[in-house]
Amino acid sequence: AQINWLRSRFDLVSLAEAQARVESGHNRFPTACITFDDGYAENLEFAIPLLLKHKIPFTCFVATDFVANNRSFPHDVAAGRPLAVNTLDDIRKLAGAGVEIGAHTRTHANLGGPLSPEQLVSEIVGSKRDLEAALDKPVRYFAFPYGQHENLTAKAFEVAYATGFAGVCSAY
C-alpha cells in the first residue's frame, strides 16, 4: 500500500537520477528516492522483493562491520531485540540485481560525537573500502548514521566529501 501510494504521487528514481535532476535544475514531477539504512535482514522478507519485482530503484546503506561479522546492532541487543542483519552474500546478490549499495560507516558511529580525525577516516573511508572490496565495484553514496544535524560535523562531512562519494545523505 505504501509503495502504491508513493508511485501514485511521485516519480520514484535512483539517487543518481535525483542528483542529475537537481543539478540540471529541471524536474517536472514530484520525485522521491527510497533508501534503507543499516542492513537489516528483515528488509529482504517483503519490501526489497516488492521493489525489485516492480523495478523501483532504491539504495541500501550498509554499516559494514555488522554485515561482515553477522552481528546485531548493539542498540538492538540492549533493547532486548537482537535483529538479524544482512550477510555479505545478501549484499552481493542485491548489488548483482542492480541495487545501489551505499556506505553507512563501519560501526554505525555517531559522526557528530567526539571522534578523532583517524576515527572519522576509519568509519567513512573504511566503510567505502570494505564495500568496494566485497562487491568489486565502486560505492558512490554515503549516508550519515542517525541522519540528524547533531549526528554530523563539518569535519565528518569534509572526510565524506574528500572520499569521493558522488553524494552524501542526511536528514539535515
Image: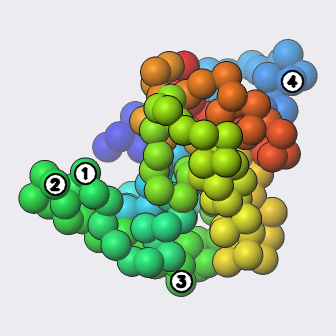
Instruction: Indicate the position of residue 23 as horizontal and vertical percent values.
Output: 86, 23
Does residue 87 appear to the left or right of 20 in the view shown? Answer: left
Residue in the foreground of this view, choosing between 98 and 163? 163
Q: Let me know if residue 166 appears in the view.
A: no
Where 172 falls versus 133 (above or below)?
above
Comes first in the chain, label 4 or label 1: 4
What residue would you read off at disc 1? Answer: 75
Q: Secondary structure at mark 4?
A: helix
Where 38 falls versus 171 (above or below)?
below
Does residue 46 appear to the left or right of 169 in the view shown? Answer: left
What residue would you read off at disc 4? Answer: 23
Distance of label 4 from label 2 (alpha carbons)? 42 Å
- What residue is rendered at 76% in x and 51% in y? 140
- Is label 2 in contact with label 1 (beta carbons under 8 Å)? yes
Instruction: Indicate the position of residue 42 as horizontal and vertical percent values.
Output: 31, 65
Comes first in the chain, label 1 or label 3: 1
Q: Secondary structure at mark 2?
A: helix
Comes first in the chain, label 3 or label 2: 2
Please identify the residue farthest to the top as the structure is shown: 25
Residue type at numbered disc 1: His
- What residue is rendered at 54% in x and 38% in y? 115
What residue would you read off at disc 3? Answer: 89
Residue 78's label in the rendered image is 2
Where the N terminus falls, by quadrant?
top left
Residue type at numbered disc 2: Ala
